[in-house]
Image: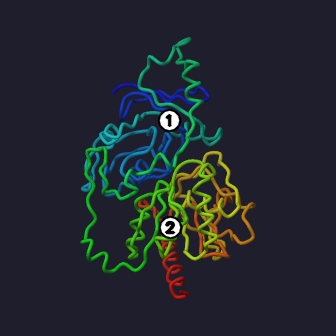
Amino acid sequence: MSSAYLILADGTIFEGNSIGAAGKSTGEVVFTTGMTGYIETLTDPSYFGQIVTQTFPLIGNYGVESPDFESKKSWVRGYIVRELCDKPSNFRSEGDLDSFLKAQGIVGISGIDTRALTKKLREAGVMNGMILSESGKLKTENGKLKVDDSLLEEIRAYRIEDAVKSVQSTKGEVSPSATMASPFTPTPSAGSDAARNARLKFSVALFDFGAKANIQRELEKRDCKVNVVPYDTTADQIIKLAPDGIMLSNGPGDPAENTGVISEIKKLCEYGKIPIFGICLGHQMLALARGAKTSKLKYGHRGGNHPCKDLETGRVYITSQNHGYAVESTTLPSYAKLSFVNENDETCEGVSYTDIPAFSVQFHPEACGGPHDTNFLFDKFISMMEKNHAIK
């Protein structure tokens, strides 16, 4: 196995083994604490532009299962694990993780101290980094590896830009049955289209900001016809579709840079006749459209073990999260009610709007890898559409 190096923007070098594709890749280095769900992580568009560190020490032990993909491909800039399992054991497995990374062109590294790396990111905050499988790019000085200044400049100059636009499907769809650049063929969903259409109750316009496929699955489980629309769809176009509800999806990057999208969401809120449910980036952009502010977190929330309190009931739920920005609770307008808070750092995790039929959450109630504690929020959305129908 050939060597690979992780170089951080502060000059720190971790030496390990090359996994996935050979070469180099620069991105924002983040960590996720999930013990399972690595396939969902790798195919989640919200990780666009980021080099992902898995804190759980053994990754890949149950292989790769295409029905679990959250989008048509992997969006990460790089992948870091302590130990990569090369012989997975799972009756559903279609191949090993290293082969998947190679097929997707993802440069990775294994065999480094991911605990030490995570502690550094927690103390210093997320920072840019580069995974490099070419030792010739590094110098040796007094027996120690040293990073060339030009390489450090390249790492530090990296920026995540046009994130939402970059993760768009050419057909505007997020179904995992789309063609993938991998050796694994996704399994089509069961049941005929005719039978499914016969039981549909509501139509939902799903704004694709980098939507995870499981959002669509959860809506379809509840007999919703889902019309996936591109991120740049206008409010007038949505209103002409006459959906029963609007879903604002998750997605990557800084929410505040999406000024055009935020402007259209504001118009939908002013229209005020269609129930709206926002998740993650959708939650943030809905808050921005209503006059609130967002800010970047020191190292974000990523993983499946984040406790959030429901302020109405006092109950704490364990949630799945993946975000680097948060809504500033103190900037919420008078017609916005804080509904969930993070028990670790008291950041905003949910908002309910009192003047229009709309609510949003920062966490992922649709999390395929779990936990499923907050899955009931989709039922809340259904109830909101039912109530809206009754009023009509």
Q: Is residue 48 above or below residue 16?
A: below
Q: In which quarter of the image is the N terminus?
A: top left
Q: How far apart are marks 2 and 1 (CA)?
A: 49 Å
Q: Identify which residue is drawn at 50% across, 35% down.
A: 113
Mark 2 closeness class: few <14, some 14–19, many ≥20 residues within 10 Å: some
Side of 287 where 38 appears, left or right:
left
For the residue pair 176 and 390, the one nearer the viewer reads as 390
Amino acid type, residue under disc 2 in the picture = Ile
Amino acid type, residue under disc 1 in the picture = Asp
Side of 15 where 311 appears, left or right:
right
Q: Could you tell me residue 123's position as x and y percent? A: 65, 40
Q: Is residue 55 above or below residue 391?
A: above
Numbered label attached to residue 113:
1
Give the mark nearer the N terminus: 2 vs 1: 1
Residue that label 2 marks: 238
For the residue pair 59 and 221, the one nearer the viewer reads as 221
- How did the renderer colour the structure? rainbow
Side of 120 where 49 appears, left or right:
left
Q: Do the residues labelled 2 and 1 touch (CB within 8 Å)?
A: no
SS at badge 1:
loop
Numbered label attached to residue 366:
none
Q: In this view, does 205 lie above or below 380?
A: above
Q: Identify which residue is drawn at 51% across, 48% down.
A: 32
Q: Could you tell me residue 329's position as x and y percent? A: 71, 61
Q: In this view, does 165 lie above or below 268?
A: above
SS at badge 2:
helix
